Image (tube, grey):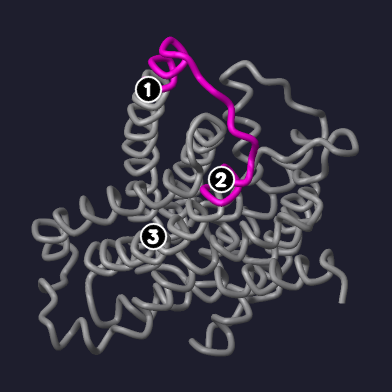
Amino acid sequence: MSKKLKGDLMLVLTAMVWGGSFVAQKSGMELIGPFAFNGIRTIIGGIVLIPLIMVLDRMKSKKQASAPAVKADAADSALSEADKKNDQKLLITGSICCGLALLVAGMLQQIGMMYTTAGKAGFITALYVVLVPIFGRILGKKIRPLIWLCVLASAFGLYLLCMPASGGFGHINKGDLIVLACALCFAVHILLIDYFSPKVDGVRLSCLQFFIAGILCVILMFPLDPVLGYDIPSLSQLLDAWIPIVYAGALSCGAGYTMQIVAQADTDPAVASMILCLESVFAVIAGMLILGESLSLREAAGCIIMFAAILAAQLPAKPGIELAAKKQS
């Protein structure tokens, strides 16, 4: 089996894990509140990334040790120390910004799923792929005509998915609207990642953002989960919910991100992005198989149109150009 095929298969597995996390989130909230679930699972995601950081650091040390030694003067050493301090400050700043965006996006998704299905949440969340270029236009980046067509197609698909056949906008499921707001926040989160990740260690950035978002979420759990009708979880409740918590934290946040890093080393970026778009499809399949969810023909048509628009938005303008949208949860 070639490295490319192994990479592609690993990305399919990653999409399956991420798609299944919507079911885990939905199931977990049957036992504990959204802030409790999201906070604990995000912290677990940060913990799982620590061994990956240690492995990458060890590989980097071995590579540096095998490289020819270069004698540096005092000025170069002082400059190197200053660069390290600046890198640390930038890493902390980036982690705080990305962590706050992840906190808001994750909580909107979690709360929205109290009122909508895992499958619909998966497709609506995936709209961040189309929204990222639109937000980039606000920041002065050019948008290809294809992206505008994808936006129109996504809007029509979203209409079919969320708008009842009979009834006006007043009949839209509020959970769908909350998850749509979540997609907007994930688009902002991706733009922040896109800004900071080339300047700092990407894995450390992800790890720290998980801890920042998770700790803040646990703090907010005490005043806000009771407002949403949930008690502060007891130890027995947490133990009852351990399967969805560990799945969403260790597998979706930690292992999923690790598999993405390993697989994309041997896979074309355009192909990788399209494979990862299957996350929304797997969310629908998992919702049907595990939760007994279903889609009407109208909703299924909306999903198909949205999926086609999401795939089209991932097509690079020229061969070899990498895509801007990168998943970080």
- Give the main secondary structure of the magenta stretch: helix
Displayed quadrant of residue 198 = top right
**Pick the front one: 145 or 94:** 94
User: Alpha carbon of mark 1 to alpha carbon of mark 2: how far?
Assistant: 19 Å
Vertical position of residue 106 compared to residue 20: above or below:
above
Q: Is residue 87 left or right of residue 10?
A: left
- The residue type indicated by label 1 comes to Glu
Image coordinates of residue 267 in percent, x first then y, are 79, 57
- Characterize the local packing of mark 2: few (<14), some (14-19) or many (20 or more) Cα atoms within 10 angstroms: few
Q: Is residue 84 above or below residue 166?
A: above
Q: Which residue is mark 2?
A: 65
In the image shown, does 141 or 115 lie closer to the viewer? 141
**Element class at badge 3:** helix
Position of 199 relative to 77 (above/below): below
Q: Is residue 320 magenta?
A: no
Disc 2 element: helix
Residue at the location (32% across, 34% down)?
A: 92
Q: Are marks 1 and 3 in contact (CB under 8 Å)?
A: no
Answer with mark 1 or mark 2, whichever residue precedes in sequence.
Answer: 2
Query: What is the span of residues highlighted in magenta in the rendered image?
Result: 61-81
Residue in front for this viewpoint, 51 or 9 = 51
The residue positioned 50% from the left and 38% from the top of the image is 193
Q: Position of residue 73 (x, y in %)?
A: 47, 14
Q: Residue at x 68, y 63 (%)?
A: 303
CA gap, disc 3 to disc 2?
23 Å
